[in-house]
Image (cartoon, coloured by chain):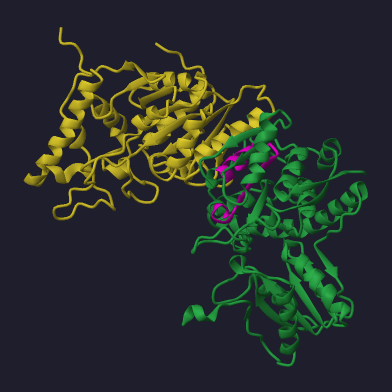
């Protein structure tokens, strides 16, 4: 299908996608750098381009609760937040996932205080890692658009029924402009379909939501989400495949690879940093260095088997993290190591903290990472976490 | 004489409330008035715990509990969800929460719901402490009441400051229908629930809900204590429409002692001479209410 390509701000690309998916209820609370999305949506609703119930909230906690209630009432519901706002939503997202309410949420990644900063990293969404919500990271404005168009169908599928977070780096994606191909609203609406809840709050069939359970069923609820996330893998694959067929040239799955064939060092990363890595990998390849890239698109469900397969026989895997579990290390790195544990192939996995709090990660930094990772291969056993750009004079 | 026409209680018997629970009595009355075309939202609290054991719900209407601090926002969301499909059946959304979830942790969400003018009836059953967790003080705990976190030790006489004026807070939001109600006056309670449901926009009903465990009295005295709260002037039964006082239940005032003395949470006030000031302050509070709302029956 032919779309219209225009220079769009990342936030606008998201708003275009969300509008076309026709959510019944939108509830939002402002936080930088997510505000442009909700401002665009507010204008769409006020001008009649979008017939959603648009509810201002008194906090992110309430915004998440409002879409929670709306979803329980059988409505397609959407919200967006960032950073501290996502942390404030955390308690709600846990209950939302376990109550199996398929809300779509745009998470504009921003670091967590203190010190307060509005720069991007992944600490906010990582703090919601264990909620049960699905997390899809995007690399570009176009991907942000594509992922949102796909999101409602994935979340609302009867086999899935989980909240879905589309994670996109603040500023780099939310506030930057690049060409984005947007498809006609009608075609997107047809693709996105409408929400048919398995059950809802309905006086003709009165159900109790949020019952008190104790030891009887909580473990079973959690296990059910494990199954649903595994099923979400198939759903994500089928929806992205169908998206490719209907709209063309979309390149996305649980993960994407670049130049991983016979790579000696494979870099693993998520989000906007992937574009920088891809450029660096191309330069290194042209210099004859065997370097490859794995972009983790779905952090939840986590593509364990796919990562192992994509790493192939690479002796060294370098994982770049924009988040940290203090006294443990980069969170993506921990997950990658866990995926390999007990398997037949065991590459040397080198964890890097890069871009925390918005610290610059450019091609030079990526090349440095490749050099460090290559050298690390000579050392056997567990690898120390390498902190890129850490200002050690700060501690003297 | 009124004829009971309901054949099925929408708040079914067999729930786990303590014998003599004021809230349980209230909820039965409330649902008799709302009827089945209602979705009820509750925050975490006694009501949630005693009505919703998994596979044993006592709710015969759709009911949703999510968390402690978000019942007003959940209610807004449910309403928005209904409205997004036109709400052709005219289903009403009613939130029923305790004082912890309303006065304290849910205050921000409640303020948001009021300010947006969402068409929701919010009823607070105020038992004046965190009873579900074991009688800890809340901002609804009144002056002089002993709880586990406002303990009576030495010179401490329980709650050292007065309770939050939630009615004034609701009125400050221009909530179009605001009232107080009591299980001691079921007809008035039901009338107010009806008015709150029919009123377009938010409605708020504050209901004092005696708790025999938390207040320390015999279960059979629940309604009597609710009645004494009214007749002392400590809990005036009033009603505001668009900010204007439209009704106030007349009383023949009795001293606050008649309400305080039967309750263990106030016993200490009668055992130490220097706590007399506290008793005086409580009586003054009742007197101020009587004057403010002109509650005393004409003597002629």
Q: Position of B135 compared to A329: left or right?
A: left
Q: State the image coordinates of residue A27 (x, y, percent, origin top left).
A: 61, 40
Q: Which residue is rendered at x = 36% and y = 27% of the image?
A: B183
Q: State the image coordinates of residue B281 (x, y, percent, origin top left).
A: 15, 36
**Which of these two is toward me, A390 or A30?**
A390
**Which of these two is toward me, A39 or B210?**
A39
Q: Quadrant of residue B216?
A: top left
| Residue projecting furthest to the top | B300
User: What is the span of residues highlighted in magenta in the rendered image?
Assistant: A63-86
Whether residue A118 appears in magenta in the rendering, the answer is no
Q: Is residue A329 above or below residue B112?
A: below
* Location of the C terminus of chain B (image quadrant): top left
Q: Which residue is rendered at x = 72% and y = 32% of the image?
A: A50
Q: Is residue B154 above or below residue B95?
A: below
Q: Position of A316 compared to A248: left or right?
A: left
Q: Which residue is rendered at x = 12% and y = 35% of the image?
A: B280
Q: Quadrant of residue B228?
A: top left
Q: Position of B55 compared to A286: left or right?
A: left
Colour yellow maps to chain: B
Q: State the image coordinates of residue B231 (x, y, percent, origin top left).
A: 23, 24
* Location of the N terminus of chain B (image quadrant): top left
Colour green maps to chain: A
Q: Is residue B223 above or below residue A280?
A: above
**Which of these two is toward me, A6 or B266?**
A6
**Which of these two is toward me, A31 or B135?**
A31
Q: Position of A210 compared to B240: left or right?
A: right
Q: State the image coordinates of residue A38 (x, y, percent, origin top left).
A: 64, 42
């Amino acid at each position: 299908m032919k779309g219209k390509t225009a220079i769009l701000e990342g936030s606008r690309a998201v708003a275009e996608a969300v509008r076309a998916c026709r959510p019944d209820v939108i509830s939002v609370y402002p936080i930088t750098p997510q505000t442009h999305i909700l401002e665009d949506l507010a204008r769409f609703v006020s001008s009649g381009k979008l017939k959603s119930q648009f509810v201002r909230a008194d906090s992110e906690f309430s915004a998440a609760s409002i879409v929670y209630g709306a979803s329980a009432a059988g409505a397609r519901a959407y919200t967006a937040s960032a950073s501290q706002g996502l942390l404030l939503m955390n308690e709600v997202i846990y209950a939302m996932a376990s109550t199996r309410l398929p809300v779509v949420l745009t998470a504009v990644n921003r670091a967590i205080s203190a010190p307060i900063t509005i720069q991007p990293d992944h600490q906010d969404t990582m703090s919601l890692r264990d909620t049960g919500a699905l997390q899809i990271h995007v690399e570009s404005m176009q991907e942000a658009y594509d992922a949102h168009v796909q999101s409602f169908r994935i979340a609302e599928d009867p086999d899935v029924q989980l909240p879905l977070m589309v994670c996109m780096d603040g500023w780099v994606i939310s506030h930057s402009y690049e060409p984005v191909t947007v498809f006609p609203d009608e075609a997107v609406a047809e693709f996105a379909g409408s929400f048919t809840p398995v059950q809802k709050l309905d006086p003709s069939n009165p159900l109790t939501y949020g019952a008190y359970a104790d030891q009887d069923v909580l473990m079973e609820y959690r296990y059910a989400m494990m199954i649903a996330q595994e099923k979400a893998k198939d759903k994500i694959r089928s929806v992205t495949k169908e998206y490719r067929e209907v709209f063309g040239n979309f390149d996305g799955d649980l993960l994407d690879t670049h130049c991983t064939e016979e790579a000696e060092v494979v870099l693993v990363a998520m989000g906007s940093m992937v574009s920088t890595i891809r450029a660096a990998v191309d330069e290194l390849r042209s210099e004859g260095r065997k370097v490859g890239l794995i972009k983790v698109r779905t952090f939840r469900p986590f593509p364990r088997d796919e990562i192992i397969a994509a790493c192939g026989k690479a002796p060294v895997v370098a994982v770049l993290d924009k988040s940290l579990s203090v006294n443990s290390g980069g969170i993506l790195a921990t997950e990658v190591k866990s995926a390999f544990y007990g398997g037949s192939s065991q590459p040397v996995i080198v964890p890097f903290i890069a871009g925390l709090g918005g610290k610059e990660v450019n091609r030079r930094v990526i090349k440095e990472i490749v050099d460090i990772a290559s050298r690390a291969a000579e050392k056997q056993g567990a690898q120390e976490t390498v902190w890129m750009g850490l200002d050690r004079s700060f501690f003297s | 004489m009124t004829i009971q026409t309901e054949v099925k209680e929408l708040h079914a018997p067999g729930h786990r409330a303590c014998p003599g629970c004021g809230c349980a009595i209230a909820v039965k009355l409330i649902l008799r008035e709302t009827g089945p075309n209602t979705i009820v939202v509750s925050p975490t609290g006694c009501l949630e715990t005693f009505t919703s054991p998994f596979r044993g719900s006592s709710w015969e209407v759709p009911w949703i509990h999510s968390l402690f601090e978000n019942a007003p926002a959940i209610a807004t969301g449910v309403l928005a969800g209904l409205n997004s499909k036109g709400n052709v059946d005219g289903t009403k959304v009613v939130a029923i929460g305790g004082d912890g979830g309303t006065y304290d942790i849910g205050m921000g969400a409640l303020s948001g719901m009021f300010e947006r003018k969402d068409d929701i009836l919010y009823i607070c059953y105020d038992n004046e402490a965190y009873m579900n967790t074991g009688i800890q003080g809340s901002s609804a705990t009144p002056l002089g009441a002993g709880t586990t976190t406002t303990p009576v030790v030495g010179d401490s006489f329980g709650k050292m400051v007065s309770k939050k004026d939630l009615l004034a807070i609701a009125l400050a939001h221009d909530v179009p229908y605001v009232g107080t109600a009591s299980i001691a006056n079921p007809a008035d309670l039901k009338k107010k629930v009806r008015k709150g449901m029919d009123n377009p926009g938010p409605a708020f009903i504050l209901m004092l809900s005696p708790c025999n465990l938390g207040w320390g009295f015999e279960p059979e005295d629940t309604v009597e204590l609710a009645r004494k709260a009214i007749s002392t002037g400590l809990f005036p039964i009033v009603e505001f429409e668009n900010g204007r006082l439209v009704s106030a239940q007349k009383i023949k005032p009795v001293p606050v002692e008649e309400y305080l003395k039967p309750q263990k949470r106030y016993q200490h006030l009668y055992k130490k001479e220097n706590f007399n000031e506290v008793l005086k302050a409580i009586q003054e509070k009742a007197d101020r209410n009587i004057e403010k709302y002109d509650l005393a029956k004409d003597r002629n």
